[in-house]
Amino acid sequence: MTSERPTTRRRYAIVGLGHRSHMYVDAILGDHADVAELAAFCEPNPGRAAVYTDLAAERGRPGVPTFAPADLEQMITDERVDTVVVTTPDATHADLVARALRAGADVVVEKPLTTTAEGCRTITDAVAETSRSVVMTFNYRYAPRNSELRRVIASGEIGEVTSVHFEWVLDSVHGADYFRRWHRLKDVSGGLLIHKSSHHFDLVNWWIADAPTRVYARGGLKVYGDTSPVAQEMAERDAAAGLPPRPVRGTGSADGTLGWEGREGDRWSLDLRADERLQALYLDSEHHDGYVRDQDVFSPGITIEDNLALLVDYERGATLTYSLNAHGPWEGYRVSVNGTRGRAELEVVERGSVELDERGRSILDPSANPGAWEGDDVRPFGDRLTVQKHWERAREVPIPEGVGGHGGGDAILLQDVFRTPVEGPRHDPLGRPAGYVDGVRAVAVGISGNASLVSGQPVDVADLGLGVSISVPSPAAPDTTPTSAPTTSGATA
């Protein structure tokens, strides 16, 4: 990075003011305030807009104007917006990204890029027309453990990659949350293969520097929903106890006349009153638009899967086997990368178990009660990267400590998001910054997988008509010199 302080700041507008947008607002008003300026918000719900305008005022930026989504172009013009940050529900991304580009702004977009092949074409057409920038925020690339695996593979130590096995486990707090909110509807989120797994497919694409060509998927809704064995068992138990049918949401009324009366401590429910931020953003704001954030995970209407398995072929011959489970007793992932010279294995435990608070409810935020996980020697929190070449003993690869969300990836990602446009791109031998083609390449697997779930047959990615080639050039000789991420005030890699 340059040593001189930039003389200008880029003006940013945040489109979509849900929970995730806080990371960007905080960055603009905090660590990156010297290069970024908060210009405007775009949000249809006045309650959520008020939460963020109040937050901005408290942080020294009063009077941030708020625009409706229909007025996106006017916002960009009137507020001289340089970059739009899109953090809205997934199915809306393509339209908003394309409109922002054509209105004269660059775009930063949360994963996934979009949910359909048509959405990919909408974005790629707008990029071709405007030549403006679209940055994908694949923060898991920046997590030190994932960066180290990329370094190992790129070094050639395990040879040419022949296959990858990737297993991701979401626990019964994090996993269940996708079945409480808008993500439960496939036409809005694309299902977990798009919304969640695009993170994972991007990691594989990036780790092995290759592009997917064919996908076969199997899966279903096996635990959540109103017809699952778990739901039926609970219904029978509640009936035997004389309880009424499960309420449609997890939050009860203050006087106990609604909601979870008789079920205090239900471990599958979410009471929005237990989290001050969730209450302000959703419970206190739902009367404006009717969006209910805490739906019962065993209610009808869920159209996404909670168990998924994929087989993916890659251009240069590697094969990926992938599985996702959204109701595990612990959370984390395991990756095994087989090569012509050996094997690399990454094991990550993000939460070894789901612990309960004093009322018997699942603890939503582990950082709020870190002592609850002390003493777990069987599945301790942490990560381990092991490399073993043929005819040699295994060795453990040191992983730098990460600080912050997504395994320490968020803080490093934000430096590329906010500082690169002003100071120019920095040299990153790992190629972590991601653009729209990386976003297309990641959702190509999920879009193909969803099509395969319907047809029961493998799907060729080339048949999707994504609007852009996703082939990856053969990698050049890698720079395997260990690097440390640049830091700014308070951001530690």
Image: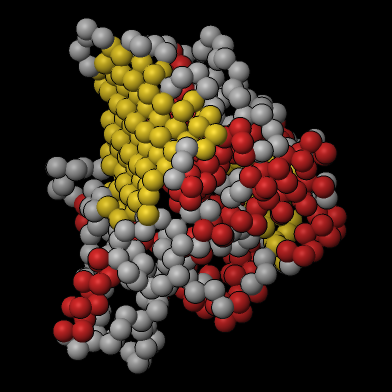
Q: How is the image coloured?
A: secondary structure
Q: Nearer the viewer, residue 246 or 12?
A: 246
Eyeballing the image, is 9 above or below 305?
above
Residue 255 in picture, x, y percent from top left: 35, 91
Q: Determine the residue positioned at 32% across, 46% down.
A: 169
Instruction: Please say whether residue 201 is visible from this viewpoint.
Output: no
Q: Determine the residue positioned at 25% across, 66% down.
A: 230
Eyeballing the image, is 50 above or below 345?
below
Q: Is residue 251 left or right of residue 293?
A: left
User: Which quarter of the picture shows residue 145?
Assistant: top left
Q: Nearer the viewer, residue 480 or 342?
A: 342
Instruction: Please say whether residue 81 is visible from this viewpoint.
Output: yes
Residue 131 in picture, x, y percent from top left: 80, 35
Residue 187 in picture, x, y percent from top left: 56, 59
Q: Determine the residue positioned at 40% across, 69% down.
A: 275
Q: Determine the residue positioned at 26% across, 16% down.
A: 388
Eyeballing the image, is 192 above or below 43?
above
Residue 457 in picture, x, y percent from top left: 46, 41
Q: Is residue 396 left or right of residue 291?
A: left
Q: How many discs mark residues in the rendered view?
A: 0
Quarter in which the N terminus is drawn: top right
Q: Is residue 229 left or right of residue 78?
A: left
Quarter in which the C terminus is drawn: top left
User: Which quarter of the picture shows residue 254?
Assistant: bottom left
Q: Is residue 229 left or right of residue 303?
A: left
